[in-house]
Image (cartoon, grey):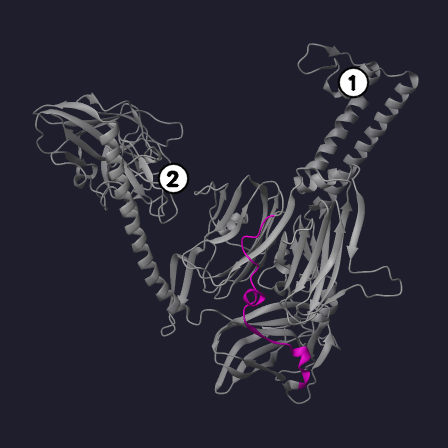
Amino acid sequence: MHATVRDLLETICDLHAVLRDLHAVLCDLHASLRDRDATPTECAGFARSFEGPEGGRLPGTEQTHPMPTWCQSPSLRLGVGRLLLSMLLEVSLLPGSGAAEVLAEITRPVAGRPMRASSGLFDPESNRDAHHVRAGQRFVLAELEGPGEIRHLWFTLASRDRRYPRTMVLRVFYDGSGVPSVESPIGDFFCAGNGMKANVSSIPVEVSSYGRALNCYWRMPFRRRCVIEVHNQSRETCTVYFQCDWLKLDALPEDAYYFHARYRQEYPAAPFSWYTLFEGEGEGQYVGTVFSSQNTVASWFGEADDRFYVDGEEVPSIIGTGTEDYFNDAWNLRLTAHGRVGTTICETKGDERRVTAYRWHLEDPVPFKKSLKVEIERRSFLEVADPETGKRTTHDFKYRPDYCSSVAFWYQRGIARPTKQLAPVEERVLPEVWIEPAWIIDKVRTSPGLAPRNAANRTCNLNRFFYLRNDEVGGWVELPVTLPERGRYAVSVFQNLYKHFGIWKVTLRGEGFEKVLAERLDFRDYLEGNQENWPENFHHGTTVETKVGTHTLGAGDYYLRFECVGANPLSEHPETGEFGNGYSLGLDAIDFRRLSLDDPHAWMQDYLQKEETLLAAWQREAGDTVAALAKAAADFRRDAGAYPHTLAELLGTPHWTGDRTLLDPWHQPYCYREPGVVHPGSFDVWSVHGNSRDPSTWIGNWRNPLALANEVAPGWRVFEGESLEAARRSAGAGTARQQTASYGNAPLSGTGLLFLRLDAPGDWVEVELPGKLAAGKYQAYALPVTSWDYGLCQWSLNGTPLGAPFDAHSQTLGVEALPGTVVALGEGPSVLRIEATGKDEYANGHNAGLDALVLKPLP
């Protein structure tokens, strides 16, 4: 506290000093200009007065401008310096460049005439400021005559339909087009998916009041006309309050883009595929994503990478590292709200976790000239329970069957044609059964003496809730519910939390059925001090959704029983205020959501069988294509005298039909290098098999697991590094056989490598090749290993250097092939020598490693 006060006082003192110096500046300037007129040169000198007492020099010239005497006042120069510094600090403290630009814009004249379209009328004697949109009705909220630009939209809605955020569709049409540039369920547009509501605090979208006050600051320019409408696709009337603040302009810039936002979903998920966030054609820039997931199986869903395909490219140029990473979080998602990114809905992990996150590309828009496609993977972890044993099993990096939905935001030249129709409302809202306690007072059963009421409450739907005054343990109430079909249901209790409320046990009862959903559900308001809802929560409490499990239930009639089992020590008696004596109950609603998978374990077993079949087919396809490419490269050499340097050289030749390089079944390009590493005398061609960091699984023109002895022609000799040992070495040097695998540019041959410990330049190791080699000439190919602590070494065989010193430093463990070198070998022992000569500045050592040595006899 003392430090805070001290900092505040120091800030006030600094501000006082700045104002004092500014006053001195103005006094000096006034006195000087009063005494004599300042020349233009002197004014320029004043502008540069803080550069030094000798004046300033114009950039690119030798001309100097002497500083007039009146500009040399110390208080003047100090004041200007402090003033500029304070201005820079003020700008630097703005929350971001987006906010800074807005604040800078309003310091200058704003073109246009301010306008507003709203649901209210200029009726001084009326408080009827809303539209009442009937079930199924399309209602035009505003027709704006351009040119103009929308600067702000505000909505608040109310309906008996609790999923109105999904059933009410917002559309915006520009310039007479019959195609809506904005078409989205209103909740998803305002960053709350799955028909839920949430508060949002970002630069273009802000939402408050339990997700009921919707504000949009996206700028929406139009040239001739703009129409804003809502479409109520629910079965209930919806009350809509609306405001649109816009500017009437004389003209729009010729290069002004139209704002677009469109919703899409995939219910159920297409198997073994990625989810498409956006797909469009034309010229524009992508500026934002709202993504929602309703999980259908347990465990973490967010290992999915984002991918942007710009202007028709088949391999994405923008690739992410995970779902939470795309939304600029890390190591999971959590409830956050920031100017550019946030997670507005984030339930705990479970069979039906619901999440909504947003990201605005304000400083990093993704421009495109011809087209753009944005995808996100579905692959992550899955956890299912065996219904017979209860054992839970986790599966790694599988395609999840979650319900995905999203809104893409972008600006574009012209009106973008739709690439996917808006899903029908029946597909956007999953089946569910609601209990509305406040509206079925006459149907509930209670213990003797209790009298439930339909009471006012500003935090609940339609500002009403179910209130039950209760003063003791044992009081109960039963609410009827009918489930239309057998299945798995996720059950939620929408609690109204308040300081007078108690702890209640929740039990579901039916014919021959009874299950406790919650042993002790506390209704005392633990969020009373939440500043976000203050002081409304002081008067009305806080309404929250509490999930009470996923349950397999049969069709039929049930009663949901709430029985008081105690009081929170902080709950208060409504009359005496005595702590520990609040036993009452407040309910907004209860929801039974029908889940799509009745048996996740059975679904998982079926998935694994289908995955095995699919991957086997993909592997066969990749193997066949690799063989065809290898044959084409060999035929190319037969005709051209040399192997192609790239696969692109095969295109348009008799050896390969088609005008583009093929993608493998994992949508990655086939790889090729000449000369090869596995085949240093020719070429390597392969598919990375969906995993570029695990060469042991690659599908190439070699057999797996790789053993070079199986790849060379008869008569060639292969010496695996892990089979060799040092014959001689310098002091401090050493060797060791290592069992490891490459995750670099090629698989290791055999089962490992020979590690060579070299501590400094000049250290060396000599290895004698086992067995007897016929005297003669050989083409020698050494395959050194690369790693993060490897250095620069000279490799030689019987004194013949195998090329120049090789730098084996790499961030990954891999293998390379040195250029083939002709070596003459005699009858005696053949010695491979490795000597350290230096290291890369990033290398952590001088070490080396040998995967294999290959000798090709020459005639």
As drawn, the residue found furthest toward the bottom would be 448
Is residue 175 or residue 409 the one in the foreground? 175
Determine if the magenta segment contains residue 828.
no
Dot 2 lies on which element? loop
Residue 659 spot, x, y in % from top left: 38, 38
Is residue 801 or residue 500 the one in the foreground? 801
Residue bearing mark 2? 660
Which corner quadrant holds the C terminus? top left
Q: Residues within 10 Å of mark 2 (few under 14, many from 20)?
A: few
> In the image, is residue 253 above or below residue 120?
above
Residue 365, visible in the rendered structure:
no
Determine if the magenta segment contains residue 435.
yes
Residue 437 spot, x, y in % from top left: 65, 78
Of the two numbered discs 2 and 1 on the same chain, state the one appearing first in sequence: 1
> In the image, is residue 637 above or below residue 748?
above
Is residue 593 or residue 732 the one in the foreground? 593
Magenta span covers which residues?
Answer: 416-442
Label 2 sits on what residue type?
Answer: Arg
> In the image, is residue 796 above or below residue 539?
above
Relative placement, left or right, of 554 versus 124 is left
Relative placement, left or right, of 789 versus 275 is left
Label 1 sits on what residue type?
Answer: Ala
Residue 643 spot, x, y in % from top left: 27, 31
Q: Residues within 10 Å of mark 1 (few under 14, many from 20)?
A: some
Residue bearing mark 1? 44
Is residue 683 or residue 393 the one in the foreground? 683
Q: Residue at x 86, y 16 (%)?
A: 38
Residue 808 spot, x, y in % from top left: 32, 31
Dot 1 lies on which element? helix
